[in-house]
Image: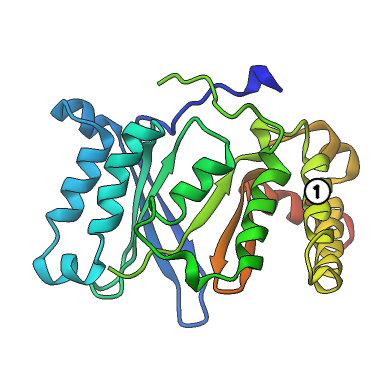
Amino acid sequence: MTEKLNFKLAPVAGTFVTRDVDRNGPIVKLYIYPGLRAQEMGVSNLEVVVGAIRALPDEQYASLRCEPMLDYLHEAAEKWKMDFGIFSFDLKTPKQSRIKIYTRAPNTSVEYLMDALPLGGRYDMAMYSAEAIADVKGFWCTFIGDAPAGLPSEAGKPTTPKVYISPASFRKNDAEVLQRLRRYFATRKNADKMLPQMDNYEEALRRIYGEEFLESTGNIRFYVSCALANDQLRVVTYLCPQTLAREEEARKRMGR
């Protein structure tokens, strides 16, 4: 595993657009890699992102209440060598649009996790139950608890703490990621509700990809992610676009 743990950021420059299908209508989102602009200006990615946010119209900027987060990002850049790979926002009206900053740091310790989630103590974690905090720690350790604490480096509204893990860097294949997810859900208080959902998820992936493919590759997931929500944890997996092509192939094989 060690040879896979070079800490590399996202591409230096570029953009991509996603489209979420929502009950209230589609949501289009724009994602920007700020590195080229930072190089052009001779500043850090963080300075580009912070400058863009602070250049928003006064009313929109005030509604974000983002100063605690921006303060922490500067602090974390020094403390954890945190860097900033992607800047994102929803293509909606200014009052409805969410602004998101995707960060990375060459650190896998629980100490780092519990510093980043409350923004270095700037947000009170009392709104989350002890069980939810234990869940997010368990999620973190399930996937990267046995990784080195430090990785080789190359390179408004109250915030919603989320954790994104790229499992391909830490697990040997996608079959093992499934095993780790199952192990995680099996240790939770609501395992009786989560494991049947895990059964469905595993069955869907095996029908789309096949067991041999899952055991031979480790990159069908961009991320496994979790988000704190009061007394519970929301777990999401992000699959590569090839999933759709595989699903279509599977449907054709089954004559659907």
Residue 244: % across, % down: 67, 54
Residue 229: % across, % down: 55, 71
Q: Name the residue under label 1.
A: 178
Residue 222: % across, % down: 60, 44
Q: In this view, does 53 lie above or below 25?
A: above
Quadrant where the C terminus sits is bottom right
Nearest to the observer: residue 120 or residue 217: 120
Residue 221, picture quadrant: top right
Residue 96 appearing in the image: yes
From the viewer's perspective, tell me whether residue 33 is left or right of residue 170: left
Nearest to the observer: residue 17 or residue 217: 217
Q: In this view, does 160 lie above or below 107?
A: below
Three-letter residue code for mark 1: Leu
Residue 253: % across, % down: 87, 54
For the residue carrying disc 1, how many other residues have a C-alpha within 10 Å: few (<14), some (14-19), or many (20+)? some
Q: Count the marks.
A: 1
Quadrant where the N terminus sits is top right
Residue 59, picture quadrant: bottom left
From the viewer's perspective, tell me whether residue 2 is left or right of residue 87: right
Q: In this view, does 3 lie above or below 78?
A: above
